[in-house]
Amino acid sequence: LERSEAEGEGLRVVRSPIRRGFAGARNLGVRAARGAYVVFLESDDSLSPDFIQHAVSALEARQEFSGVVPTGGRFHSSEELANRQFKGFMTYLGDCPTYALAANQVSAPTAMLRRTVLEQHAYNETLSGYA
């Protein structure tokens, strides 16, 4: 991270002297953000090389969208599962159907969201986990 930041690759590392938890860390990142969109990544996340390009294109084309989320994933707990790409995830336009959330078909922690939406609706820092 530090090397990419130093080489001017468009990455900026934001540090906190205290542990803020999931919500607090994200809120800190949103306050430090300069761009129109924010992408959150956890330490075990990776994105396909073209995710950013496609996500920005989708948000530019559909101003009514608040954000986009990837629709696939890999398990990394074993070599066998690491190589299994899950197919059959659905693409949603508009509000996400309740059954998609119940079936865990949406990776909300790794999402590109409009910064303006995040500024208006901050993560609740009194809740733990992904709340």
Image (tube, rainbow, N blue to C red):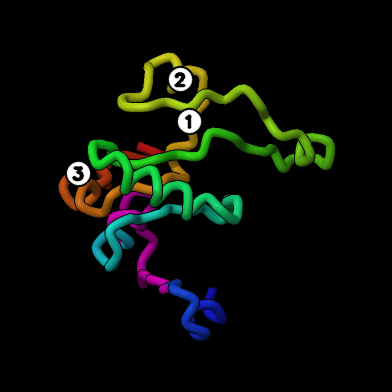
Identify the residue shown where x is 45% and y is 72%: 11
Q: Residue 30 in the image: x percent, y percent?
A: 28, 59
Specify which label sits upstream in the sequence, 2 or 3: 2
According to the picture, the residue beneath numbered tag 2 turns out to be 100
Q: Quadrant of the C terminus?
A: top left
Q: Secondary structure at mark 2?
A: helix
Q: Secondary structure at mark 1?
A: loop
Q: Is residue 7 left or right of residue 36?
A: right
So how many labels did they put on this image? 3
Q: Which residues are magenta?
A: 12-28
Mark toward the start of the polypeptide (1 vs 2):
2
Residue appearing at x 47%, y 54% in the figure: 53
Horizontal and vertical percent position of residue 44: 60, 51
Residue on which the image places disc 3? 121
Which quarter of the figure has residue 61? top left
Question: Residue tagged by mark 1?
Answer: 106
Residue reaching furthest to the left: 120
In what quadrant of the picture does the N terminus appear?
bottom right
Indicate the amino acid at tag 3.
His
Instruction: Kindly report which numbered mark, 3 or 1, lies closer to the viewer in this rendering.
Output: 1
How far apart are the two marked residues, 1 and 2, measured between alpha carbons? 7 Å
Residue that appears at 57% across and 51% down: 47
Relative horizontal placement of residue 47, taking residue 55 as reference (left or right):
right
122 left or right of 82? left
Category of crowding for the residue at label 1, using alpha-carbon neighbours closer than 10 angstroms: few (below 14), some (14–19), many (at least 20): many
Residue 59: image location, x then y, percent: 33, 45
In space, the residues marked 3 and 1 are separated at their CA atoms by 20 Å
Q: From this viewpoint, which residue is outermost toward the front?
A: 61
Label 3 residue SS? loop
CB under 8 Å between callouts 2 and 3?
Answer: no
In the image, is residue 13 part of the stretch drawn in magenta?
yes
| Circles 1 and 2 in contact, beta carbons < 8 Å | yes
